[in-house]
Amino acid sequence: MGATIVGCGKALPKLKVSNDDLSQIVDTSDEWIVKRTGIHERRIAVEESSTDLAVTAAAAALGLQGVEGVECVSWRFEGASAAPVDPASIDLVVCMTISSDSVIPSQAGMVKMRLGLENAVAFDLNAACTGCVYGLSVAESMMRASAADSGAHNALRRVLVVAAERLSRLTDWTDRATCVLFGDGAGAVLLDWNEECPGIRSSFMKNTDDPEGFLALGNVLAAGEFPFGENAYELPEGMNGFVQMRGREVFKFATSAMREAIEAVLERAGMRADEVDCFVPHQANERIISHVARKMGLPLELFQISIGGCGNTSASSALMALCDAYASGKIAAGDKVVLAGFGGGLTSGAVLFEA
Ligand code: COA
């Protein structure tokens, strides 16, 4: 028995921004970006809010209608033409984001309201780009605890795990070292508690201190003027409320952290890497993915690569890639799948599940 994925959704904003478009804004080139990252274009949310993206991805996972005009991909275990999931049957919505439209209500609360998930509890979770791993792991733990407690008031049998990011609002568009990497988008997964299927078999989460700020995003609202005396918190020098990054250091962290996380979930499930049918990594850089595959002696074809058309969409990235893998037939029923991530915090982790 376990928390089993029965639906996936992905939502993309309309505006496509190519590498050539970016070379009009900063000193860069299509050749440099493709060679160093594998990114060809990204989507930027201009007409769409973060909530629009989250709602559309979640709706796609449930077989419901999303926001009109927002592009989406949907995969459902019972097939595309199966009846939509009853919104009242959703018990919990967990949303991972660092770029929600509002802090209160939470992004998850907005999804609950807009989709009419009348019985759902909803909260947000921030683990930067590893959000999807943390979200799946937290949701699975809560479902398992609820299943073990027959008298539970809040039985959690059907849970939506959603990630939505609008990183374009947190990006310094004058900084070529970061602005070429990120994009906007949302992903969602519907988990059902299934007595027959193992579903999520193991998970691993880790936080590594980042005292030098290899990857950082200061909160401008916490700093600055204050009528009650000296503000205890000032943004560290050089920090400006946009994502800042030391690329080479993050690259080094990413490759070792992702490998460590994959090996940890394999060990916890008592499996070898060559028994895995599909790896779905965080999509930050194609070179990071191929580096991990090479170091683990695994064929790159086992890894889902979706970064070319969307860039790094932070917490949404691996859920969007997972939706692509299901929709394209790369993942079939019974397959063993590892979803792995790393990101700011520094966070890292992985989830191993049976499809
Ligand atoms: N266009 C053109 N040149 C650029 C550039 C851009 N967009 N960004 C940086 N450069 C230049 C640098 O200024 C540097 O020039 P120099 O040699 O004259 O000093 C040169 O390219 C090499 O820079 P470097 O940072 O060493 O490149 P890199 O091979 O490490 O690639 C990243 C840079 C960012 C693509 C890579 O380090 C990376 O992907 N890091 C991890 C990022 C990540 O995963 N972030 C998200 C975590 S969730």
Image: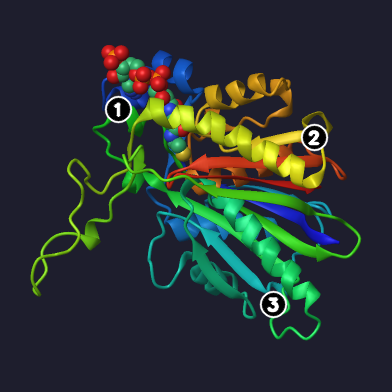
Contact flag, marks 2 and 1 (Cβ < 8 Å): no
Nearer the observer: mark 2 or 1; the answer is 2
The circle drawn on residue 345 is none
State which mark lies toward you, 1 or 3. Answer: 1
Which residue was labeled with disc 2?
276
Instruction: Look at 38% across and 43% down and name the residue there.
Output: 210
Q: Which residue is mark 1?
A: 176
Where 117 falls versus 24 (above or below)?
Answer: below
Q: Nearer the viewer, residue 167 or 21?
A: 167
The answer to whether the residues at label 2 and label 3 have Cβ atoms under 8 Å apart is no
Q: Secondary structure at mark 1?
A: helix
Residue pictured at 47% horizontal, 15% vertical: 35
Q: Nearer the viewer, residue 210 or 66?
A: 210
Is label 3's Cβ within 8 Å of ligand 1?
no
Q: What x and y, as percent, mark residue 328?
A: 74, 36
Q: Residues within 10 Å of mark 1 (few under 14, many from 20)?
A: some
- Give the quarter the ligand 1 occupies: top left
Marks 1 and 3: CB-CB under 8 Å? no
Percent x, y of residue 31:
42, 13
Earlier-in-chain disc, 2 versus 3: 3
Q: Is residue 136 left or right of residue 207?
A: right
Mark 3 surroundings within 10 Å by alpha-carbon count, few (fewer than 14), some (14 through 19), many (20 or more): few
Q: Within the image, what quadrant is residue 18 found in?
A: top left
Is tag 2's residue or tag 1's residue first in the polypeptide sequence? 1
The reply to whether the residue tagged 1 has its Cβ within 8 angstroms of ligand 1 is yes
Kindly identify the residue that appears in the image at 72 percent across and 73 percent down. 156
Res 88 label: 3
Question: Could you tell me which secondary element the residue under label 3 belongs to?
Answer: helix
